[in-house]
Amino acid sequence: MFRRRRRATRPRLISPWPFVGMGLMAASLFLYGASGLLAPPWAVVALLVVWLVLFVLCCRWWTPHPDRLPFVALFAVVFWFAALSAGGAFLGWSA
């Protein structure tokens, strides 16, 4: 039997950015979950749906666009802060 020689290949470097982005998404989930202390239940459900959409986007972008995940996670935190600030200012949400 003949054996083929395998060409030595260099291992691919793994980017840390998707892991950083998913870690930030996990941290932002606690913010979205704790929104019930300030926001009404319908707003908490809406915020959790927004977080779920952003999480699915991160899962879809894991391989094709790994460098974008931290920006999506930072957007999730900024959106949470803006939504609760706007709700407190314009809709009268209070603790």
Image (cartoon, helix red, strand yellow):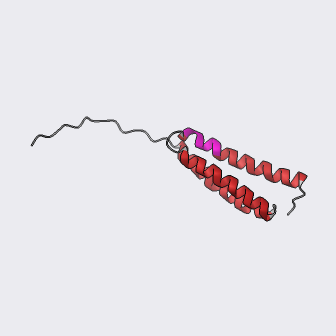
User: In screen coordinates, is 8 left or right of 13?
Assistant: left
Q: Residue at horizontal 61%, vertical 55%?
A: 26
Q: Residue at horizontal 74%, vertical 51%?
A: 80
Image coordinates of residue 68 in percent, x first then y, are 59, 39
In magenta segment, residue 76? no
**Quarter containing the C terminus:** bottom right
**Quarter containing the N terminus:** top left
User: In screen coordinates, is 72 left or right of 83?
Assistant: left
Image coordinates of residue 81 in percent, x first then y, are 77, 50
Viewer-proximal residue, 26 or 51?
A: 51
In magenta segment, residue 69? yes
User: In screen coordinates, is 42 left or right of 27?
Assistant: right
Magenta stretch, main secondary structure class:
helix
86 lies above or below 9: below
Q: Residue at horizontal 51%, vertical 43%?
A: 16
Q: Residue at horizontal 52%, vertical 45%?
A: 62
Image coordinates of residue 88 in percent, x first then y, are 87, 55
User: In screen coordinates, is 35 left or right of 61?
Assistant: right
Question: Which residue lies most toward the left here?
Answer: 1
Residue 2: name its quadrant: top left
Residue 48: name its quadrant: bottom right
Q: How many numbered discs?
A: 0
38 lies above or below 50: below
Image coordinates of residue 7 in percent, x first then y, are 25, 35
52 lies above or below 62: below
Q: Which residues are magenta?
A: 67-72
